[in-house]
Image (spheres, grey):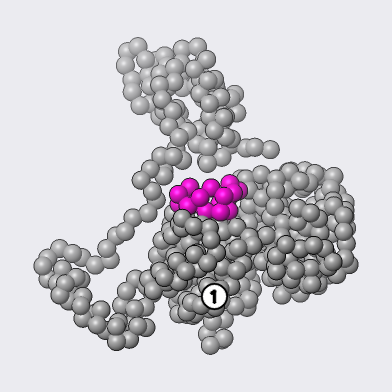
Amino acid sequence: MATPSPGYSITLRVDGPPDFGATTRLAHVVAEAGAAVQALDVAESSGDHVTVDVTVHGTSEEHGEQIRAAVDAAEGFTVRHVSDRTFLLHLGGKLEVVPKVPLVHRDDLSRAYTPGVARISRAIAADVSDARRLTIKRNTVAVVTDGSAVLGLGNIGPEAALPVMEGKAALFKQFAGVDAWPVCLATQDTEEIISVVKAIAPVYAGVNLEDIAAPQCFEIERRLRDELDIPVFHDDQHGTAIVVYAALINALRIVDKEMADLRVVVSGVGAAGSAIIRLLLRAGVTDIVGVGRTGPVHRGAELPDPMRVWLAEHTNPRQVTGSLQDVLEGADVFIGVSAPGILTGDDIATMADRAIVFALANPDPEVDPVEALAHAAIVATGRSDYPNQINNVLAFPGFFRGLLDAQTTSISDAMLSAAAEAIAGCVADGELNSSFIIPSVFHPDVAPAVAQAVARVAEEER
C-alpha cells in the first residue's frame, strides 16, 4: 500500500560517466528501485565525469537506503552524498519572530520601547482589556502540548513534539494570519498543565491544545474553559470532528442518505472519536456505536473514564456487542480514528449498500483504501496521496480566525457545526463526486468561510 511520498524525499549527489545517456540511465535505476523521480540537475561537469543531483520521493527511511544502494550498484555510478529533504526543511526550526514596526532611528526606539512604552503599560494597568488592543495578544494563540500523544508516535515528550507544534503554528499563520507559538510543557500532570496554561494566558487570545492523551485531555480542556476568559480548543477532538462532519455532509449528498437514517460505527473512542460522536449526535444521527480496544461501548460495561460513561449513556441504542467486524455488518458509515490494518475489504463488503468509509489512522489507515473502494461508494483517509483527505488544517486556522475576530471568550457546539457546514459548502455542486467530497487545504475560500461562520455564531450568542 505504501506509495512514494514527499515526506521521504531525498536528494542523491551522484558521480557518473560524462556520456550523453548517463542521466537517463540514472533515472531508470532509481525508478526501478521504486522511487518517484522529481528532478535531475547537473551540479558539476568535467572531461571525465558528471555530477548529478537526483531528487526522488521514497516510501520510508529504509527505502531511501535501498535507493542509495541501487545507484551505488549501477555500473559507472557512485553516490557521493544523500540529503534528507525533510530534515533539511526543519534545520533551525520553521518559525521566527519578526518586528511589525520599523526600528531604525532613536525616534522609533523611544516610541516602541523606553520611554514611550511606559505610557502603554500604564494604560493597560488602568484597563486590562486594552492588552487585546495594544499588544500581540489580539492575534496570538498558544499551541500547547505535553507530548503525550503526538501524531501516531505516542508519548514521545515535549522536545520531540516541538517540530509538530512549530508546523501547527506555521499553518495558523499561512492559512489565517494568526500568530501562534509552540508551548511544549515538561509535565504530564493534569493540575500542573492547567496551572501553567493559566499562568501564561495573559499573552494569548486563545489556547489550542494539541496532542494531549485521553482521558486527561478532557479534564484539561474542561477546566481551562471554566477558568480562563479566552477560548480553549482541543484540535485533536474538535478540529477532527469538524472536518469529519463536513466530509460526511457532502458524502451523503452523493449516496442520497439522511443523517437521521444512518447507522454509524466509530472505531476509536479517545479524543477524536468521542468528539466526532458528539458532533454527529448533534447533527441528528441516532444510531452510533463507538468501538474501543475492548469492544463496543455499551451500558453495563466496565468503563474507565467519565467520557466513556457519557458515550455509553448516549450511543449504541441497540446495545450491540461483539467484535468490530460484528458491529460493522449492515452499517452505513465507518469512521476510523484508531489503528492501522484492523479491517479488510471483506469486512467492508458486509456494510450496507452505498457505504461510506473514513479510515483516518495515519500514516496507515484502518483498511487499505483500494480494498475498501471495491465495496464502498466513498472512501476517505487522512493521507495526502489519496483522494478525500480529511485534514484538520481545513478547520483550526479559520476557526481561530473567527474566534479572534469576534473577540469571544468561549466556544460552543453551534460554532463547531457552523464551521463544518462552511467547509462542506466550499465544494460546489459541479465539483462534487465520490473522489472530491472535501475541499483542498489550499482552497482560498475555506479559512475565510470558516472564520465568518464562527464569528457569526459568536455574535448571535452574545
The residue lying toward the viewer, choosing from 283 and 309, is 309
Q: How many marks?
A: 1
Residue drawn where x is 70% and y is 65% of the image: 305
The image position of residue 324, as x and y in percent, is 82, 53
Q: State whether residue 340 is above or below residue 459.
A: above
Hey, which quadrant is residue 123 in on the image? bottom left
Query: Disc 1 marks which amino acid?
Result: Arg
Which residue, given by chain and number where applicable, does mark 1 sit on? 225
Give residue 285's quadrant in the image.
bottom right
Can residue 40 be seen here? The reply is: no
In the image, the segment drawn in magenta is 147-164
Q: Nearer the viewer, residue 22 or 319?
A: 319
Quarter of the image for the N terminus: give it: top right
Residue 148 counted in the magenta span: yes
Q: Picture coordinates of residue 132 (x, y %)? A: 37, 78
x 76%, y 63%: residue: 303
**Prevalent SS, magenta region:** loop
Determine whether 268 is above or below 449 in the image.
Answer: above
